[in-house]
Image (cartoon, rainbow, N blue to C red):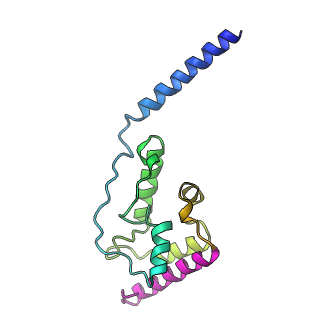
Amino acid sequence: MATRRRRFLLRAGLGLLVVAVLLQLVPYGRDHANPPVTEDAPWPDGRARELATAACYDCHSNQTRWPVQSFIAPFSWMVARDVSQGREALNSSTWDSDDGEADDAAEAVADATMPPRRFVLAHPDAALSDAERQVLVDALESMDRARRGGDRSG
């Protein structure tokens, strides 16, 4: 009975290993290109820029730092999807052509839905204290008001 169980576990383990190796052949999630920055967001101060860089820029800019897991399927698929969706929602590297979603971003930061919990688990430096969260919210709201007023100077 123990031999049969051991043989089953060995085959199951080998099967999982084969599946894991085959997953690496799926090409999605391998393109780690960072498009050029056309105009960086006009952060009102250095502290706000520092917080945004740590907590937001990996998904919401063209300055993504691609972590180790972004090279290993199926994690690479999640990372690629998150970066694509993040850049689509708000891209701090294309401020000149962005749709002005800074107010939505401010709400998400204030509600603590951004950065997402799973991102913070993988990037502890992205965790925001309440005070840091407020600095980022104030900066995003300031940039949104400046954009609506036609003034991009922050």
Residue sitting nearer the eye, 97 or 3? 3
Say if 93 sits above or below 122 in the image.
below
Horizontal and vertical percent position of residue 116 = 57, 61
Q: Is residue 63 magenta?
A: no
Say if 52 sits above or below 149 in the image.
above
Whether residue 38 is visible, yes or no, is yes
* Residue under the point 44% across and 48% down: 68
Q: Is residue 147 magenta?
A: yes
Q: Quadrant of the N terminus?
A: top right
The tally of labels here is: 0
* Residue under the point 66% across and 10% down: 4
Whether residue 77 is visible, yes or no, is no
Name which quarter of the figure residue 110 lies in: bottom right
* Residue under the point 43% across and 66% down: 57
Residue furthest to the right in view is 1
Horizontal and vertical percent position of residue 35 = 29, 61
* Residue under the point 40% across and 90% down: 149
Residue 140 appears left or right of 152? right
Horizontal and vertical percent position of residue 86 = 44, 62
Residues shaded magenta: 130-154
Residue sitting nearer the eye, 110 or 121? 121
Say if 69 sits above or below 135 in the image.
above
Q: Main secondary structure of the magenta part?
A: helix
Horizontal and vertical percent position of residue 117 = 60, 59
Q: Quadrant of the C terminus?
A: bottom left
Residue 118 appears left or right of 22? right
